[in-house]
Amino acid sequence: MSIRGSLIVDKRHRCLESEGDASRIKTSHPAISVPCGFTPEGLPVGVQIVGRYRDDFGVLQLAHAFEEATGFSTTRPAVAG
């Protein structure tokens, strides 16, 4: 993976970029993924928050508020056994 500004681009996206569809990928909207629980199998689940153009601070504020309100960022899955 490579990082371009705040956008992480993997091999699939590079393929799309080479085909001229990059405008659908590069929106410049800030985004963050925040933990929001676990599946019954113990796999982590996250919620993605996407903000308005250039509202990085608003996205960080919402992510922080979500983590504080839910407590999911400090929980761990049960150990299988």
Image (cartoon, rainbow, N blue to C red):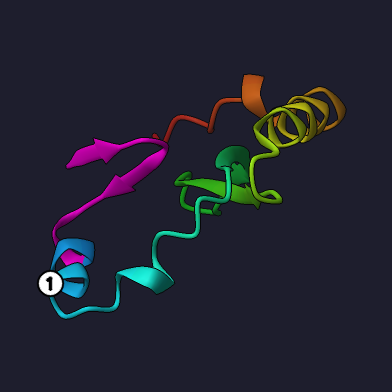
Name the kind of residue labelled 1 in the image: Ser
Where is residue 78 drawn, in percent x and y? 53, 32
Q: Quadrant of residue 23?
A: bottom left
Which residue is under mark 1?
18
Above-or-below relation of 26 to 67 = below
Total numbered circles: 1
Judge by depth and name the residue closer to the eye, 81 or 3.
3
Q: Is mark 1 on a helix, strand or loop?
A: helix
Q: Residue at x 71, y 51 (%)?
A: 52
Where is residue 40 drawn, in percent x and y? 55, 54
Where is residue 27 drawn, in percent x and y? 49, 59
The answer to whether residue 8 is magenta is yes
Relative placement, left or right, of 5 versus 10 is right
The answer to whether residue 64 is magenta is no
Quadrant containing the C terminus is top left
Where is residue 11 drawn, in percent x and y? 13, 59
Q: What stretch is highlighted in magenta?
A: 1-12
Q: How crowded is mark 1: few (under 14 residues within 10 Å), some or many (20 or more)?
A: few
Judge by depth and name the residue closer to the eye, 61 or 77.
61
Quadrant containing the N terminus is top left
Q: Residue at x 58, y 43 (%)?
A: 30
Q: In which quarter of the image is residue 64?
A: top right
Above-or-below relation of 28 to 65 = below
Judge by depth and name the residue closer to the eye, 68 or 21.
21
Relative placement, left or right, of 17 versus 28 is left
Relative placement, left or right, of 55 versus 68 is left
Above-or-below relation of 23 to 47 = below
Judge by depth and name the residue closer to the eye, 14 or 67.
14
Q: Residue at x 71, y 33 (%)?
A: 63
Q: Which residue is drawn at 20% across and 69% down?
A: 17
